[in-house]
Amino acid sequence: MTILQTRRRFLASAASAAALGGLSTLLPALIPGAVRPAWAAAPLRLAVERRVLEVMGKPASVFGIRQPDGTSGLFLDPGQRFLVDLANRAGEDAVIHWHGMTPPYAQDGVADANRPLIRDGASQGYDFEPRPGTHWMHSHHGLQEQRLMAAPLIVRTVEDRREDAQEVTVLLHDFTFKDPAEVLAGLTGGTMDHGDMNHGGGHGGGHGGAMPMMNHSMDMKGMGDMKGMGGMTMAAMDLNDVEYDAYLANDRTFDDPEVVRVERGGRVRLRLINGATSTAFHIELGALDGTVVAADGNPVQPVTGRRFGMVMGQRLDILVRLPDEGGAFPVLAQREGERQRTGIILATPGATVNKVAGLADGAAGPVDLSLERRLTALAPLAPRPTDAAFTIRLTGGMAPYVWTIDDRPFGEHRPLTVLKGQRVTVTMVNESPMAHPMHLHGQHFQVAALNGTALAGAVRDTVLVPMNGSATIAFDADNPGRWPLHCHNLLHMATGMMTELVCEQTI
């Protein structure tokens, strides 16, 4: 037995011992500090930093999560541990959530009563077995994610290395030049402040926007026809909360898009990440046929097409083959309900790259469950009886701008308590006037039913629950701790749409 194996066992034992009683006493063991044994591998270094980004010709002060050489995020090789020292140079306290990872509770990157924020100027160590696939990292505190405190987190497999495909990672964002707190205040009527958005020291949320909007397609003429909120049909409203100044793909708009050089006749694996704060996108491949091979980092039975929906927090791996004659091929991300779009361009050698308009010819419809219904996990849950079943209601609305679960904002929530090893189902019923991408920390789940129809769907960590619809997820609770279950529209999470799954040790 090697020393590394012994250390892994120690970390696993500490994590499994972290039942809710006495959890705080185990935190030093769960989070490696700056002092490491001489035999330990050198950690990878990441820093949360401020940077200036030019958007549509204007400078903007934003955040980044970068390696010393400037690489955004992390790209891990097969078998490589998530052994990371994270330095906070943001000028303010921060915490980074490893979205898609299932680490021990204390290393999830969420601040709560047991897990402090990383103070400005301090560093924090992490050491756990990473989960393969396309994932990402982002702030889970205050307004920071809206200010681009996010980056890719890619964990490659041996199969990825054997695959004859060029990898292209695309991180999508919505962007505002304004202070996001000002925009949220416009939505809430100024009833929230910075402190409110962390719900009394609980799981902090980000949020933001550029201009509050009450209808995805309503212009000023339409607003003149309003007879107050009560005079409107809610079903006709609320695809989007706000209008943004720009939509970004790898920090760029179609004013100056990223052009990725690819081979004629070659294959490309697109690793697409919807890191937007409150925007769902339609992925449009144009002349290329695409095959979805993974959802939220988990392999699925291949699904082909040219148009795929992605809500906030979700990831899709899509394989495309370039034609032998070559050319330039935009990969578009169009905002649901709108004409705005962003993306990148795949171009073979010598191809003419024409300008792509930032507005499509027509508005896109809502992102729906059409793709979700077609996805089937390659490694589904083993059949077994359900030990714990829950139903929660997604509630709240635009006026007042408060989003809740079972009519309770986070802080007044009722946790879902399970025992380690139990098969758990959670049915989420959406009674609110907007769709919600619901994300669970600490566990990956299989989509077990959509709108009451059972299916053996994808294994993932974020699922869309449409307006007037429902989604049921199933998983085996194998990771003790207090795990947020929340809407990944961060405006909604910030105003209360979050609860916790509390996974306790068996006795």
Image (cartoon, helix red, strand yellow):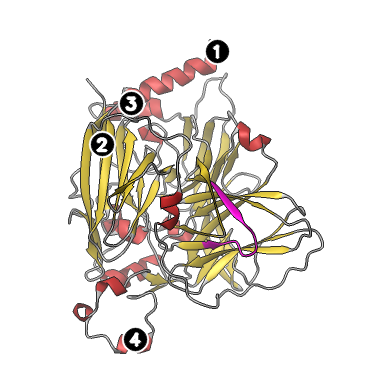
Q: Is residue 275 left or right of residue 154?
A: left
* Residue sitting at x 22%, y 20%: 507
- The answer to which of 415 and 477 lies nearer the viewer is 477
User: Which label belongs to residue 26?
Assistant: 3
Badge 1 amino acid: Thr
- Across and down, in percent, residue 281 comes to 48, 62
Q: Which span of residues is magenta-colored?
A: 283-293
Residue identifier under label 2: 502
Ranked by sequence position, the earlier of labels 3 and 1 is 1
Report the mark closest to the observer, 4 or 3.
4
Ranked by sequence position, the earlier of labels 1 and 2 is 1
Report the mark closest to the observer, 4 or 2.
4
Report the mark closest to the observer, 3 or 2.
2
- Across and down, in percent, residue 105 comes to 36, 34
- Residue extending furthest toward the right: 350
287 in the magenta segment: yes
